[in-house]
Amino acid sequence: MSRPLLKRDVIEDAAIRIFATKGLARTTIKDIAAAAGVTEGALYRYYEGKEEMAWKLFNRELDKFTHLLSEVLDDDRMSFNLRLGLAIQTIYDYYTYNSDQFAFILLTQHGFPQEKLLTRETDPLGMTERFVGQAVGAGEIPPCDADLYAGLLMGAILQPLVLHRYGKLDITPQTHAQVTEGCLRMLGVA
């Protein structure tokens, strides 16, 4: 009984690794099957095709990531500054310990047909927009366009990870603190 589940896990782990490396458009079923050490037919036992597999895996991995992030962002017992710092630490830790999953989420998010994309409470940009908007409303940060500043925050937080992924930047234990300081300055609260 556990063998089919194990095979599916191996296939899904291989798919995420290949999608994170080659991208959605350049990955083939043959690539995934070879990386998983299974036949192409084995993949079709679980999924109709590459697009369905990628979409389901994307949603699963995004839900895992955003659940961790929402635990920090939604905890209003802490100050804005502390929540922002912990959120950045959470993102950087997730990247460190789940680099293939993180790259898969980041690099494939724009590869799905528009009609499949859902507006969800767990969308990372939407979460950030609400976080900034609530901080403005509570007077924790100066008034700003929450949508614009959410985009700026996302760029400031994620771009160092993208640069690291491509070998252009070292990520040290101090990096998340430096990114947090830069984000607070951008928001006018540092």
Image: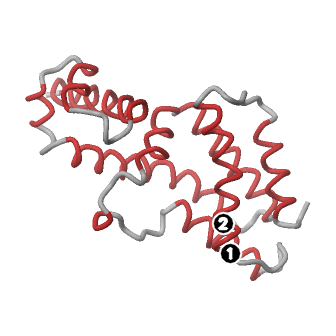
Q: Nearer the viewer, residue 34 or 65?
A: 34
State the image quarter where residue 44 is shown.
top left
Looking at the rendered structure, the kind of residue marked 1 is: Ala
* Residue found at x 35% / y 29%: 18
Q: Which residue is mark 1?
A: 146
Say left or right for 152 vs 112: right
In the picture, measured across the screen, residue 141 lies left or right of residue 23, that is: right
Coordinates of residue 54 in the picture (x, y in percent): 29, 44
Q: Which residue is mark 2?
A: 150
In the current view of this chain or complex, which residue is farthest to the right? 190
Quarter-wise, where is residue 149 in the image? bottom right
Residue 34 drawn above or below residue 159: above
Identity of the amino acid at label 2? Ala
Quadrant location, the C terminus:
bottom right
Is residue 163 positioned above or below 36 on the image?
below
Q: Where is residue 131 drawn, in percent x and y?
A: 66, 69
What residue is rendered at 25% in x and 25% in y? 31
Q: CA distance from mark 2 to mark 1?
A: 6 Å
Tags 2 and 1 in contact by the CB under 8 Å rule? yes
The front one of 34 and 61 is 34
